[in-house]
Amino acid sequence: MATNTNNHLLGEAVIHSQLLLSYIAEHGIDIEAKQINILTHAKHFDANSEWTADEEAIFWFTYQQVVKLIRPVTINSLLATIEQPILNQNFLQRMFKQKVKQASAHIAVRRYTTLALFSMVMMLLLQIYSVVGTTLLKTIEQASTRMKEIELQLTDLSLIDKSKNKRTSMQFGMLQSEFEELENEKNSSIELLNYWHNIEFLDFSSDEITPATEQENEFIGGPGMNPAYIERVNVVQSANNVHLILNIYILPLIYGLLGGFAFVLRNLTTEIKEMLFTKESRINYTLRISLGALLGLIVGLFWGDNSSIGQNFIADLSPLAVAFLAGYSVEFLFKLFDNIIGTILKTNVKKEDSKK
């Protein structure tokens, strides 16, 4: 049993030695002729089972020297980067006449590129969705603010005798017209917002908001128990909640994910070009992408909504930009966290020492 295992390992090493020679020849790496002869003869020794103890020892020593010669490239990275012939084809491989096994590096590129493109499309859809909601909410807020100002002005003008002052009468009429336009704009925005927050704005299949009546328009900006008024208030509050969740949790997470994908694709290109990619790299990249999404979510929680503005460069960036940077540069953010924790601990130690 042990002999069979040793023969199998020796046979694999012989195959790998030919791969090493091919790589060395293609990249113009200097190697002694004696080493080439030993590795070349090893193939014939293995095919004819003519190994002796001395020949095997010389082969392993030469094999070790050649492996050191091509570092940081390794056998595993060469196997993961180079396509290899399929020795035992299965049914599907015979049917599609597949004679070469795809390299692990090429499969990884296709997988990560597909996932990155899918995440990008999701980000664009959610970003557009968020922008539409932000625009509608801002329109409603601006209209409500201006309507309150107009209401105060109308109240002041109503105390003046308009029959004796034509200018006041014209101003009163202009303010009433502006008020009606703003009311119509606000009602239409609330109706669109209802479609938006129900995620049914594309087919307009959600229930319509009851339009405001003239009696309701008289009671502008004030609290009331009118069902239509309460319904519109509920729509705005519900849409605000959806908008908040989208901008604090979902979008930062996706931006962090995209940052992780950007880092992976950039490093994957370099590793494949330099033939440094191995199967273990996939594990590292998967963890890196997961960390990017996690840090994106953390950034969303720390930075709050998009309206937050700080006094330094990082704080002045939008949470989504910081989430992307966090996903791309995980080490930088972890170092930042370590520095913050270290500063807090030093401050606590100084306080305790001063008390003593």
Image: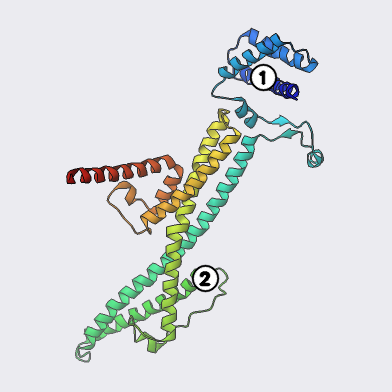
Q: Residue at x 24, y 88 (%)?
A: 158
Q: Write down the quadrant of residue 1 in the picture.
A: top right
Give the vertical position of 151 relative to 86 (above or below): below
Number of the label disc, if any, that sits on residue 209:
none
Q: Secondary structure at mark 2?
A: loop
Question: Comparing marks 1 and 2, which lies closer to the viewer?
Answer: 1
Residue type (three-letter) at the residue carrying disc 2: Asn
Task: State the residue in front, 324 or 205.
Answer: 324
Q: Which residue is tagged 1?
A: 17
Asked if labels 2 and 1 touch by Cβ distance under 8 angstroms, the answer is no
Q: Is residue 329 visible?
A: no
Q: Position of residue 56 (x, y in %)?
A: 69, 13
Q: Which residue is tagged 2?
A: 198
Residue type (three-letter) at the residue carrying disc 1: Ser
User: Residue most toward the front?
Assistant: 356
Q: Is residue 296 visible?
A: yes
Q: Quadrant where the C terminus lies?
A: top left
Task: State the residue in front, 5 or 299.
Answer: 5
